Amino acid sequence: MLGPERQTQLEEISRQDHQAKLAKRDEELAYYPQKMAELDLKPIDRFRLYHPDPSRLMELGVTFAHRDLESVVGAMANGEPWAVVSGLNPSGPLHFGHKQVFDELLWMQRQGADVYIPITNDESYLVGKASSLGEARRTAYESVIPSIIAMGFSPDKTHIFVDSDYPDLYNAAMDIAKHTSLNKIFGVFGFGKDEEGENSGTVFYRGAVQLAQILLPQYEELGGPKPTVIPVGVDQYPYILLARDAARKKGFTPPAATFTKFGAGLDGKGKMSASRPEGAVFLTDDPKTAKKKIMSAYTGGSVLGSFQREHGGVPEICPIYQLRTYHFDNSRLAEQCSSGEILCGECKAQAVDEVLVYLADHQGKLPEAKARTPEFIFDTPIRSPLKVK
Amino acid sequence: MNIERLLSTRGLVSQAPSAEDIRSRAGSIAPEPMRLFYGETYDDKGHPIDSLKYYLFVSYLAEALKQEGSNVDPSILVADTAACRNVGQEHQDYYMLLGDQRAKFVSKVNDVYNTGLRVVRMSEYIDSPEFVAERDRVMQTCNADPELMAAVEKTVPESKVEIERVKGFMYSFDEIATILGLDIKVGPPREDLYDDVARRVAERSGQKGLMSLFLTPTFPLGMNWSYFFANEGIEDHGITAYKTGSKRLQRNRIVIERSDPDYVRELISASFISTNPAVPNPTLDIGIICEMAKRRLEGVDSPITLADEFYDGQISPNVLKERVGRDVETYVLSRF
């Protein structure tokens, strides 16, 4: 039992904390509409209104905007070829932040998309996330690719490649680079003083290799120009602009994009990232580690339970809320949290249960998934850039 | 069906004056008749079922007013002169002939559904001294007022403003002069621009302004969700009800005297349908036309509740499609 003075003190702390969290929520809620206006993106609402079965992340507003989905929906609805490309840095095992992206890719595959997943060990090495190309390559095959396969992708419509093992990508990159000026790349990415320490490879990667990944499904060996979607965060919009520009010059279909909010790290310090392992639940985490991370996570709740019962939590900024709604079916949770019906301890305990069930299932599938890797590896030769004209 | 019930028919009326305003107008002009009007052009692709929605609605409204003791003059304008202006000189005779066919079609509608609509052709009055004088007066009023003239320009699609400027906006002035003395003008929502100018011209000359009554927009059949997603703004304006070839979608329309019932059923079966009332529902739209037709044929005056039944979940999307597929043949196609 707390003394009256301590009780008052904790109530004041709770009140201030709650106000700060509400302010953070308002700031975050304002961020994406502002970005949409700035980048001239369209809200996903219209797509959600018409599509007979939109994705869970679209329903939640996590996938919140798009650019030019109009160019894709005809193929999507009429069973014609279309593609989605989403690359991944193999700097460590996958976590729930990655899973969010792959869930969206799985949904797109169910809508008929051919899913291309470049594993960018070249980028990992160039930007210093891996000590060597080989190390990142090993992580890709040992951990990343089996995890992706275990999520349930269909081998017929999934095309995974590790950049360094697919040299044809670099021929395509050279082909695309010819259509992309350095001025444009510097203009889009704003290379300047901050980037003085960067190596030339990052320029080639961003200005050519990444664009080649995006436009790869449109090469004649893969059926030629076709609608393509790139699921990205708003910070990656420059790549889309460059890719659309290069596509026009190549006679390809400018790729469309969907924009997704990042899932928050459990430490409340930004998006879930492998660079802050304590804030990420990895799909390879053992139950004890996962439980510890979840139970010690930052939340949208208050210091005092009684205060939270009265004033409710702030689910919009809560990583546990995001974990439980982005990945599991908890449609009432926002209401339960903001009304004070559920407190953080109980909510975290439920999150642990949900996550551990998922992890056990996922990890149980990994050995078989690893054995099936060859079924998913993409190695179609792209020789058209080498044609003599 | 009384006026209130008719105007509140879900899925049929998009925007309407209040029943009180309508009654008040009828009272203020009595014993003169209430002039109810719907005007349309046409193309060479046949008579779309969507025109029938307007003909039947005008007759329903006329009936409701008559039941309350008002004198009514419901008319359908076949704007043949306007239709001819939209095509090249070499097609003028052909389009006048098509106008003749459209006028005959409306007369046939009168015979089939006992609608009692007066059919007027634009060519019958466009060169008359009375109309020319009225149009001149409208032109003078508009030319003297830059704000009004700007509103006239807005009646023309942006891409055609300069062409119409050379022609002195004659097309627009003909339309405005035509609708100036009306009491209620029934039409699709996109006609608001003409109606607005007509009201402002009437106000300046101390005349009564027309009341606009908009029915729900027309949508193509046989299109899946992607068409509606990709055509932003279609919810508000749809496609042109009275032109079968609007947006070159003639294969996605039901054309009276031409469409094969089996093909129509296939079209309906392939149509986008949602239980969300905020999005277009071409099948329901056709279903409501069939309900109106059925009531006229059977002499029944009960309210049309199809949209309520559908959105309340009493009729499933598949059942609605089957029912509408049958009803189009029974109450419309087989009657012509």
Image (cartoon, rainbow, N blue to C red):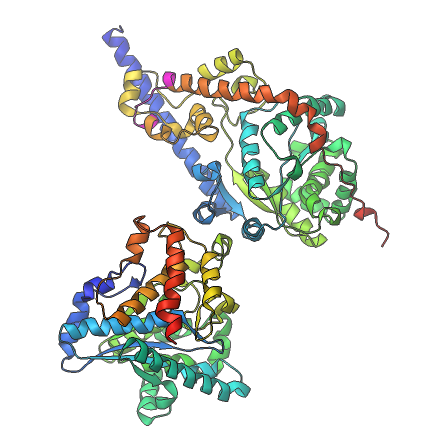
- B216 sits to left or right of B34: right
Question: Does residue A341 belong to the magenta stretch?
Answer: yes
Seen from the viewer's position, the closer of residues B154 and A351 is: A351
Residue farthest bottom in this picture: B129
Quadrant of image for the N terminus of chain A = top left
Q: Can the viewer see residue B315 in this picture?
A: yes
Quarter holding residue A315: top left
Q: How far from the left and from the top, in percent, is residue B247?
A: 50, 67
Q: Is residue A282 covered in magenta? A: no
From where the camera sits, is residue B196 visible? no
Q: Is residue B271 above or below residue A91?
A: below
Tell me if B113 is positioned left or right of A385 in this view: left
Residue closer to the observer: A150 or A346: A150
Q: Is residue B224 above or below residue A165?
A: below
x, y percent for residue A9? 29, 13
**Residue at x-position 47% and y-position 30%:** A326
Q: List x then y, in percent, for residue A157.
A: 64, 39
Q: Residue at x 61, y 51 (%)?
A: A80
Residue A73's place in the image compared with A356, above or below, is below
Residue, x 32% and y 48% (percent of image)? B313
Q: Which residues are magenta?
A: A337-346
Please name whichever residue, A305 or B34, is drawn nearer the observer in this view of the structure: B34
Does residue B168 appear left or right of residue B67 in this picture? Answer: right
